[in-house]
Amino acid sequence: MAARIRKGDTVVVLAGKDKGKRGQVSEVLTKLDKVIVEGVNSVITHKKQDKNSAGGRVPKSAPVHVSNVALIDPKNDVATRVGFTIKDGKKVRIAKNSGEVIDG
């Protein structure tokens, strides 16, 4: 199945503690159906000190389920669903709201 959300896409969070926040997808975890969005779902991890770096509390972004994010429409700057179509013999993603081609 083709990926509706890809690395580098700008998305908005639809549910959870960070509802309404926007960010860029930094990683897609396909087997877990989750994405990591920069600046969203921030958690604190504790890192043990070693000889190369100091220990302490390190903030990082935790994964968000792909159903809880929506792609930002490049034309209207609002959340949209993603569809697929064939253009010039190549499968491309389109925004359902505006019909705008997202990539390709």
Image: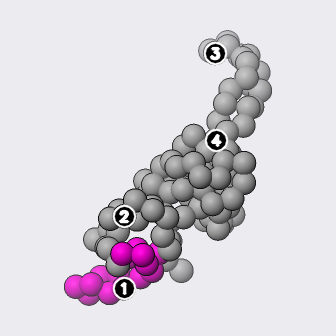
Measure the C-alpha gap from mark 4 to mark 3: 20 Å
Question: Relative to 54, is 77 above or below?
Answer: below
Mark 2, residue position: 76
Neighbour tally class for label 4: few under 14, some 14-19, many 20 plus, Cα within 10 Å: some
Quarter-wise, where is residue 51 in the image? top right
- Looking at marks 2 and 4 on the same chain, the residue that comes earlier in the sequence is marked by 4
Question: Relative to 82, is 45 above or below?
Answer: above
Amino acid type of the residue that numbered disc 1 sits on in the rendered structure: Thr
Q: Secondary structure at mark 2?
A: loop
Residue 42 located left or right of residue 26: right
Q: Secondary structure at mark 3?
A: loop
Front-most of 71 and 6? 71
Query: Tag on residue 61?
Result: 4
Residue in the image at 40% along x and 65% along y: 73
Amino acid type of the residue that numbered disc 3 sits on in the rendered structure: Ser
Q: Nearer the viewer, mark 4 or mark 3?
A: 4
- Looking at marks 3 and 2 on the same chain, the residue that comes earlier in the sequence is marked by 3
Neighbour tally class for label 1: few under 14, some 14-19, many 20 plus, Cα within 10 Å: few
- Looking at marks 2 and 1 on the same chain, the residue that comes earlier in the sequence is marked by 2
Mark 3, residue position: 53
Neighbour tally class for label 3: few under 14, some 14-19, many 20 plus, Cα within 10 Å: few
- The picture places residue 93, in percent across and down from the top left corner, at 39, 75
Give the residues drawn in magenta, as a range. 82-98
Measure the C-alpha gap from mark 2 to mark 4: 27 Å
Let me know if residue 12 is in the magenta part.
Answer: no
Front-most of 49 and 19? 19
